[in-house]
Image (tube, rainbow, N blue to C red):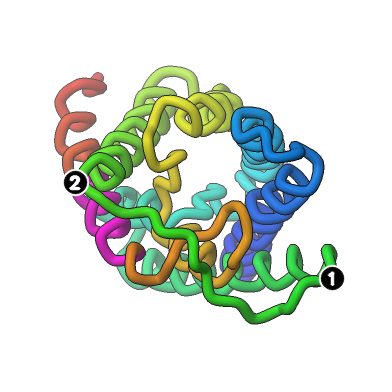
Amino acid sequence: MRRYVAECLGTAFLLAGVVGSGIMAAKLAGGNGALALLCNTIPTGAILTVLILTFGPVSGAHFNPAVSIAMAMRRELPPRIAGLYIAAQIIGGMVGVLAAHAMFELPLWQVSMNVRTGPGQWFAEFVATFGLLLTIFGCAARTPAAIPYAVGLYITAAYWFTASTSFANPAVTIARALSDTYSGIAPAGVLAFIVAQLLGVVAAAALARWLFQK
C-alpha cells in the first residue's frame, strides 16, 4: 500500500507543480509567452527531480503510466501492480490539479479550453515520451543514481524543444484536461496525445532492449 500511496502523492505534487506554476507564470509574465513558459518549465523539472529522490526508494517513482507500462513490458513490474500504479497516478494527478486550483482560489472543477492538437503536436508527444523512456532505461543500465537528475533535466529541455511542451505522461494529460489554465489541454486532444505517448513507449522499450544490453 505504501507504494501506491507514494505513486498517488508523487503524481499529485507533480501536477500541483505543473498547473500551479503555470497559473503563477500567467499571472506574473505580463503576456510574455517565452517568460511564462520558462516560469512553468523550471519548477516542473525541479519538482520532478525532488519527487523522484523522495519517493523513488518506496515505489520507484514512476508518476507516469508510460513508465509503469514500459516496466511491465520489460517484466520488471507485474502487470497487476502496474495497473494499480496507473490507477494511483491518475487519481493523484486529478488531486494535484484540484490542489493547484484551491491554492489560487480558482473554481475546483474545470474543463480546459486550451486546444492542443495536430500532427506536429502528436509527433512531439511521441518524441517526448520516446526520449523520456530512453533516458530512464539508459541511466538505469549504467548510472541508476543519475535518474532523478536526468529525468528532471530532460523534461526541462523537452518543454522547449517539443511543439507540445512535452506532456509525455498519460496521467498528466488526463489531469491537465481538468484545468482551464495556462497548462491545460482541451479534452478533445487527450486521446491523440495518449496514443502518441503509448507509441513512444513501445518504440523506446524495443530499442532500449538492444541499445543498452549488458
At x 40% / y 71%, what residue is drawn?
Answer: 187
Residue 202 shows which numbered tag?
2
Residue 86 shows which numbered tag?
none
Image depth: mark 1 or mark 2 in front: 1
Q: Is residue 143 left or right of residue 133?
A: right
Q: Is residue 32 left or right of residue 151?
A: right
Q: On the image, numbered disc 1 is attached to which residue?
A: 105
Q: Which is more toward the observer, 44 or 186?
A: 186
Kind of residue indicated by mark 2: Val
Secondary structure beneath dot 1 equals: loop
Give the answer, above or below, for where 201 lies relative to 170: above
Counting from the top left corner in percent of width and height, residue 47 is at 70, 41
Q: Is residue 75 visible?
A: no
The N terminus, quarter of image:
bottom right
Crowding at label 2, few (<14), some or many (≥20) Cα neighbours within 10 Å?
some
The stretch of residues the image draws in magenta is 190-201
Counting from the top left corner in percent of width and height, residue 18 is at 64, 50
At x 29% / y 36%, what residue is drawn?
Answer: 130
Say whether residue 76 is magenta: no
At x 35% / y 64%, what residue is drawn?
Answer: 190
Give the answer, above or below, for where 161 lies relative to 85: above
